[in-house]
Amino acid sequence: MADFSQTRSLFRIPEGVIYLDGNSLGALPLAVPARVGRMIEAEWGQELIRGWNSAGWMVQPRRVGDRIARLIGAAPGTVVMGDTLSIKVYQALAAALSLNSTRRVILSDSGNFPSDLYMAQGLVRMLGDRVALKVVEPEEVEAAIDDSVAVLMLTEVDYRTGRMHDMKALTRKAHSVGALTVWDLAHSAGAVPVDLAGADADFAVGCTYKYLNGGPGAPAFIYVAPRHADIAPPALSGWMGHEAPFAFDLDYRPGGGIERMRIGTPPIIALAALDAALDAWDGVSMQDVRAASIALSELFIAEVEKRCPSLRLASPRDASRRGSQVSFRHPDGYAIMRALIARGVIGDFRAPDALRFGFTPLYIGEADVRGAVDILAEVLDGKLWDRPEYRQKELVT
Ligand SMILES: Cc1ncc(COP(=O)(O)O)c(C=O)c1O
């Protein structure tokens, strides 16, 4: 098993905290504050507007995209950063629909993240109901892929349970009936090995604030397969995706390749934070991360099932069908999670009853898992969660 003690020393975890929520918001890499400070002082402060050229701000979305490409099995020049994941979902879906415009159906599943479905619903309305969104159960996706489908839009790893779709098999099936694919990698990038090129995926999108540790609201990424990159029509045709933004033409002409998926001015401060965060991945193999993540998750499941019989496993038992998170169900899951957080074990809760725990080998080890289960067992055995203040719902769960 690879040794992650070196990467662990690159993160700040507050004293007394066991952090099992890197699947929601990654921990702070120690390199980030200094890098962001430098960017602000030396680049913004000294270079002012010249920074777009002298500090390379203009090419930052592509440069950082290339660093993420390595982690998701994509070739250099196929990934670009910017905007939020919801926007990238819209962009990818709109482009895929345009490339397959004789078909009517967007196929997705009920395990998809609601925002992806909401964005699809908005797009359907924009298109005057020329297309329709069909949502099936995750187990029914494969059978529902037929020649009416324009685009198969799925999140590879289910945000609630960690259940993982077989990207390669579903992409192959989609292509066999002439459908295109949009994969949401929010819970995959930095969590499990992803091979976009090997799976022959058409479009992919993802966020960088979870397993990639870019910080709250860090910019999203979009991948377009090289075969589509020069022909995919951008629905959100902003000036940064124009062939020549500084020609200030009145008419939009899409830029070459992945550049056309840029929209507006990139968030340079946030990109500096993400760029520094990605240093922690240098020299790290996703296969090693996967092996460590499975070992931690298996240990967690075994210990919880032994010591906390009132919790019911919501995630697939087969590790190969799971991402890097484990969920357990309990009717009082919310109060239990609040009691855990009050004792320094940080996971999160997803309605109606799922307690989620994320495993991030870069900064979480076996001692954390054992310590978390000790506290979880204590909270359940002593019914320590059964207090009115733990039932009070906060704005973010
Ligand atoms: C799978 C998935 N898709 C989309 C989103 C929405 O991302 P954003 O809020 O960055 O637009 C999330 C957020 O957690 C997510 O988990």
Image (cartoon, rainbow, N blue to C red):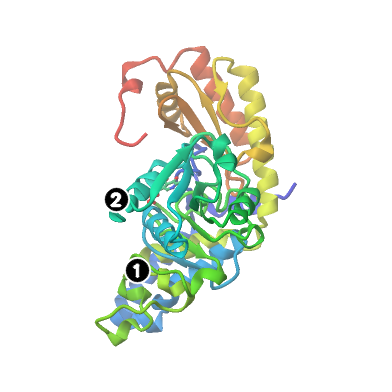
Q: Does residue 128 appear to the left or right of 288 in the view shown?
A: left
Quarter of the picture holding the C terminus: top left
Q: x, y (%) of residue 259?
A: 44, 74
Q: Can you give x and y, in whole percent of width and height, for residue 286 in the image?
A: 65, 54
Classify mark 1: helix, strand or loop: loop
On screen, residue 144 above or below 352:
below
Amino acid tagged 2: Arg
Q: Is residue 26 left or right of residue 86?
A: right
Determine contact: label 2, label 1, CB under 8 Å.
no
Does 81 sit above or below residue 375?
below
Front position in the image: 100 or 39:
100
From the viewer's perspective, is residue 323 above or below residue 173?
Answer: above
> Quick check: can you spot residue 4?
no
Q: Is mark 2 within 8 Å of ligand 1?
A: no
How busy is the neighbourhood of tag 2: few (under 14 within 10 Å), some, or many (20 plus)? few
Tag 2 residue: 125
Which is more N-terminal, label 1 or label 2? 2
Residue 59 is at least partly visible in this image: yes
Q: Indicate whether 42 appears above or below 175.
A: below
Q: Amino acid at mark 1?
A: Ile
Residue 108 percent location from the top left of the image = 47, 44
Residue 263's mark? 1
Give the residue at the far top of this rendering: 382
